[in-house]
Amino acid sequence: MIGLLLIGLSLTVSRVSVHDPSIVKDNGHYYVFGSHIAAAKSDDLVNWQQISRDYENPNNNVIYGNLQKTFEKSFKWAGHNDGDCVGGYGIWAPDVIYNKDYVWKDGSRGAYVLYYSTSSTWRRSCIGFLVSKRIDGGYQPGDTVIYSGFTNTGRVNYDGNSRIDTTWSNDYLNLKNLIGRGTIDKNIGTWKCFNRDGTWNNNYAPNAIDPTLFYDATGQHLYVTYGSWSGGIFVLELDKRTAKPIYPGRDGIEPISGNIIDRYFGVHIAGGNHQSGEGAYIKYDKNTKYYYLYETYGGLLSDGGYNMRLFRSKNPLGPYLDRSAHKAQNSGVNCYLYGVKLIGNYQFKGQPGYRAAGHNSAMVTDDGKYYLFFHQRFDKRGEYHELRVRQQFLNEENWLVTAVYENKNEKITKYTKEEVVGSYEFVNHGNAEKDGTMLPTKTIVLGQEGTISGDYSGTWSMKDGKDYTYVTLNIDGQSYKGVFFSQKDDNGQKKMTFTALARNNLAVWGSSNFIAISWPKAKLTITKSSPIYVKAGQTFDAYKTNGNKWVRYDRGETNLGDCANKNGNKNDAVFILEKGATLKNVILGPNSIKNVYCISDGCTLENVYFENVCSDALTIEGSSNTGAKYTIKGGAMKGGRDQLIRHNSAGTVYIHKVYVEDSGRLYTSCGNCKSGYQGRRTAIIDNISAVRVGYLAGMNKNYGDVVTLTNIKVAGGHVCRIYQGNNNGSNPKALGNQCDYSPINSCECR
């Protein structure tokens, strides 16, 4: 498409609802498996198709078949018509991985292994697995392998609204069998999962829920990590041939990480003391040689402050450290101080509000792209939730930062300073553990000279990496390191964004208040010694004229300096348009005093890009016809110490979808013309984004001028200045400003 659409339309995206989504790629398709047997698939990571909804068709589900048969062994302990799920099911947070080493009964190898959890209370849960030869169904029961919430009081115990005896030695648990075989220590009295009275020690032992699977760097070791609140997050190695845990057998200390080893539950890596923390997900990245641990804090409801945290380690069993070098294994006290908080509750102006983003999975593609998958709740929409996908990027320190807007398959690249300077909405995601309030949205300006101003002050810098541009923001003694990324916002509007994090574990986002644009790149520069005339009613399409290439035109002027004394006239112009003429799809270079003149009753400029204006971009003169129409639509203008569009004639100027940067003003109704037309002029200015302008429009109150402004964004500068005009050539008297706010939906200046 020729030209540039500054204001986009909202993209139509196929949405799905999958709570606690876990991602897996298979044969070019992407699948997410979630709680309550929900699942979905996608071919592009943007549009999703629901495969199974929450507890859809429980007697013959497309993935799980008959739930009571498939989960029969697990349901004997938890998850069906019991406790918190009386009258229904409690099936939570599955994860699927392809295990090429799994051995079937017939000796064949390779299976999709689906680990799941069933739960009846916050402590009585169990983890089991299913196996299949295809990813999207046909799963058969494997075994139930990890239980939690059992007791050793010497009497029958019940948990909550249940008649299931929680005594550890019951045959529907695997503990008596494991002890009998000598797989785990038989000395029950020394097992820390029991309090002194034999009740369940939830401060030490985990809730057996939220399992996820990962391979180590060699691909030779397969692990499951799991846990929710209670005693924290644990890791167990699995036997790849059977997909069952390799129980440690004895309590101890893991030698590399210093983490506690439990005989049955495995290696403790995070949390404890019933601090919040669940939905752990570990992903090894061969590019950085780190294992990245994600964990979600807070309550999962819309007012619960659900939020994802990030740690990393060189060892699959830890220690996992956050950006502050805090060890996750110590997060059982004041957990809010641990982990980089990725996303809080936030809202950008004119866009939806987001709450309780959490319980994520992650993916690193073969070509080195990073994606984050999570469920998202919304402001003022109750407990409704949807799957969301965001890109992630490595900053200079190999920490993953998360894109400001959801994935639409935009490609990150390198950016110039001109593309990133300007005003941004700014969100600091903080470190609150479970604060359900909406975060404040502030404003900062990244200045051309490297300063930060607005609600925060500081400095900023940028530098190019291999594939994209890094940013460093120095605010309040912290250096936030991240990347710039041009994205479309939730309204389909292109925005420059930044995402960064600091040593204090805080992540910050910025979304530009100006419209991020990509200037066309000239393939050729044509220098003219005299103006090019476009005759009445004709069109000069520079793109088509030059073989469908963007071309720059100028007059070859040199030594223009700051243009302070370069007024010029139409003989210095690059183009002169006669009545009804059109100029389109052209770049006007910086080496000209004047650019375009309209010299009669109306003309049109379409997708014209002014790279660095000296005197005027467009001068309108030579007509006293009050019905004349001059239209400027699309394109962009940069520079111009005085005005860009000088309206000396009668008639109406229409300015639509134009980007303006570093200019004195966009439009001026002549306030001191000594000859020619003197009278009422009109301008209609719509869909404008302006960065660092003195003011957007100037008009004369005494001549009855009217400037109508709609859909205006101004980052740095005023909007409309009122003058007392004259016809003697003196500088007009400024009377004040109107419509002096941004953004403007509609305002009339008169």
Image: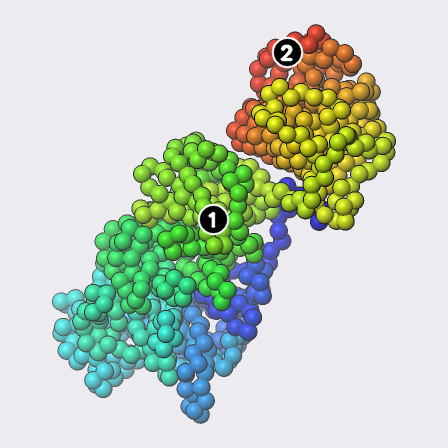
Q: Residue at x 81, y 18 (%)?
A: 624
Classify residue 334 as left or right of residue 415. Answer: left
Of labels 1 and 2, earlier in sequence is: 1
Question: Could you tell me if residue 142 is visible in this image?
Answer: yes
Q: Which mark is residue 732?
A: 2
Of circles 1 and 2, the one toward us is 1
The residue shown at (23%, 57%) is: 330
Residue 621 point in image, percent of width and height: 77, 21
Q: Which residue was labeled with disc 1?
A: 464
Q: Position of residue 172 (x, y in %)?
A: 30, 80
Q: What residue type is labelled 2?
A: Pro
Q: State which quarter of the image contains the C terminus.
A: top right
Percent x, y of residue 282: 37, 65
Seen as rendered, the residue at the extreme top is 728
Answer yes or no: is residue 143 visible: no
Find residue 288 and report its image quarter: bottom left
Along the line of sight, which residue is nearer the eye, 93 or 508?
Answer: 508
Viewer-proximal residue, 722 or 379? Answer: 722
